[in-house]
Amino acid sequence: MMFLYVDITDENLAKPFLTLFGLEEAKNTVVTAFDNKISSKFLLQSDLTPINIEEFCTRLLDGTLSPYFKSQPIPDNIEASIQIIVGKTFDDLVLSSPKNVLLEVHTPWCISCETTSKHVEKLAKHFKGLDNLVFARIDASTNEHPKLQVSAMKSCIIAILLLC
């Protein structure tokens, strides 16, 4: 196990690490880990105490630590024609939904995704009266889920998925 210290106040050094975890606004010390064998990342989400750091490291070595997936805060989707999905709501609103879900996976900086989003918005308006169909959108640059694997080069091509 190797430990690195990155000064969180040095934006050039800290930003790539913090962005990977969706913690760009972090002001305090964070403890993270990477397991390159299984391409997973981990975040200590409890208080920063010696015992919690020791338990974090032990569980990481034992393989019992749950991977960390970044997620935006849960949005208010009341009355939205397109539901906003985040990492924390992916299970409930997409995978466990009793309805058919048309999910647009996008990134805000992708020009092709921008065009796709406009088409999805038109579809959502056209099919507004169908009770068994939900239109949804997830920003793949700021939300992760173990069952949502998107290649950066293919994200616009596979931007719309119908999940039943």
Image (cartoon, rainbow, N blue to C red):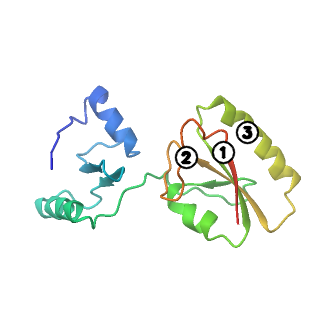
The vertical placement of 65 against 119, above or below, is below
Res 24 visible: no
Identify residue for label 2. Answer: 150
Tell me the crowding category of disc 1: few under 14, some 14 to 19, or many 20 or more residues within 10 angstroms, Cα based.
Answer: some
Q: Find the residue positioned furthest to the left.
A: 50
Identify residue type, mark 1.
Answer: Ile
Identify residue for label 1. Answer: 158
Q: Mark 2 or mark 1, which has the lower sequence index?
A: 2
Q: Nearer the viewer, residue 104 or 163?
A: 163
In x, y percent, where is residue 122?
83, 45
Q: Confirm or deny contact between disc 2 and disc 1 (CB under 8 A).
A: yes
Q: Mark 1 or mark 3, which has the lower sequence index?
A: 3
Identify residue type, mark 3.
Answer: Thr
Tell me the crowding category of disc 3: few under 14, some 14 to 19, or many 20 or more residues within 10 angstroms, Cα based.
Answer: some
Query: Residue, x 25% and y 29% (percent of image)?
Result: 10
Quarter in which the C terminus is drawn: bottom right
In x, y percent, where is residue 7?
21, 34
* Res 116 label: 3
Q: Secondary structure at mark 1?
A: loop
Q: Nearer the viewer, residue 101 or 126?
A: 101
Q: Mark 2 or mark 3, which has the lower sequence index?
A: 3
In x, y percent, where is residue 163?
68, 62
**51 on left or right of 91:** left
Identify residue type, mark 2.
Answer: Val
Marks 1 and 3, Cα distance to the nearest angstrom?
Answer: 10 Å
Query: Residue, x 62% and y 65% (percent of image)?
Result: 93
Which numbered mark, 1 or 3, is in the foreground of this view? 1
Marks 2 and 3, Cα distance to the nearest angstrom?
Answer: 16 Å
- The image quarter containing residue 62 is bottom left
**130 on left or right of 71:** right
